[in-house]
Image: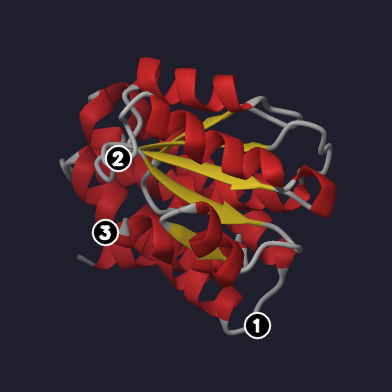
Amino acid sequence: MEILNQIAEFLEKGEDKSVHDLTEQALKNGVPATQILNQALIAGMDVIGEKFRAHEIFLPDVLLAARAMQAGMELLKPLLTLAEQSGLGKIVIGTVKGDLHDIGKNLVGIMLKGAGFEVIDLGKDVSPEKFVDTAINEKAGIIGMSALLTTTMPVMNNVVELLKQKKLKDQIKVIVGGAPASEEFAAEIGADAYAFDAASAVERVKQL
């Protein structure tokens, strides 16, 4: 449908007003909200994710596209049930206790929302208990943790251990990221996945 392609294209260019106006028009034309969400907004953000991963575009472009997506989502949200909004599932993210770096984590949150996930962002300096308790209370299937300091990396291990203690390791998956993290580290602590950047985080989360 031509209008859906146009919304996706304007989203990729970061033109939030055009995305808003065309989304409004599509709704008036009787296009279902779920179709606009999946075939225009998420489709556009998928292209942004691929281009970002290939280094064809940069962080400011991603942020502009995310803002354009939000302009469309404002119109769609009242028409979508929670289940439709978060069709891909729910993830709890945060920077681990003792670590106050959150630029990478924030970008991961934006990209995950753009891909259609419901994201619960706990911010920075998050304790293992808060990660696990929130995941349980919110019925989230994945915990995503970021660390930029080698000294805070053990907190990631503590989260995995806490899930094991509560016998939830099979139900709640764990993905880790951040400059000092690696595939080897993730395997060592028993995490389910490692992501080296925001675009790969979306891919890994989809796989989980």
According to the picture, the residue beneath numbered tag 2 turns out to be 89
Q: Position of residue 75 (x, y in %)?
A: 39, 31
Task: Report, in whole angstroms, how far the alpha carbon at label 2 lies from the one at label 3.
Answer: 18 Å
Residue 87 position by quadrant: top left
Mark positioned earlier in the residue sequence (2 or 3): 3
Task: Report, in whole angstroms, how far the alpha carbon at label 2 lies from the one at label 1.
Answer: 27 Å
Q: At 58% across and 57% down in the image, what residue appears?
A: 65
Q: Quadrant of the N terminus?
A: bottom left
Residue 206: mark in rendering = none
Q: Position of residue 130 (x, y in %)?
A: 57, 20
Mark positioned earlier in the residue sequence (2 or 1): 1
Instruction: State whether residue 187 appears in this view.
Output: yes
Judged by depth in the image, the label closer to the viewer, 1 or 3, is 1
Q: Nearer the viewer, residue 97 or 6?
A: 97
Q: Nearer the viewer, residue 165 or 169?
A: 165
Q: At 40% across and 54% down in the image, what residue appears?
A: 115
Q: At 57% across and 47% down in the image, what residue appears?
A: 110
Q: Quadrant of the C terminus?
A: bottom left
Residue 55: mark in rendering = 1
Secondary structure category for the residue under label 3: helix
Q: At 57% across and 70% down in the image, what residue appears?
A: 184
Residue 197, above or below 55:
above
According to the picture, the residue beneath numbered tag 3 turns out to be 39
Residue neighbourhood size for the residue with mark 2, other residues' Cα within 10 Å, grouped as few (<14), some (14–19), many (≥20):
some
Residue 13, above or below 92:
below
Residue 109, above or below 96:
below
Instruction: State whether residue 13 appears in this view.
Output: no
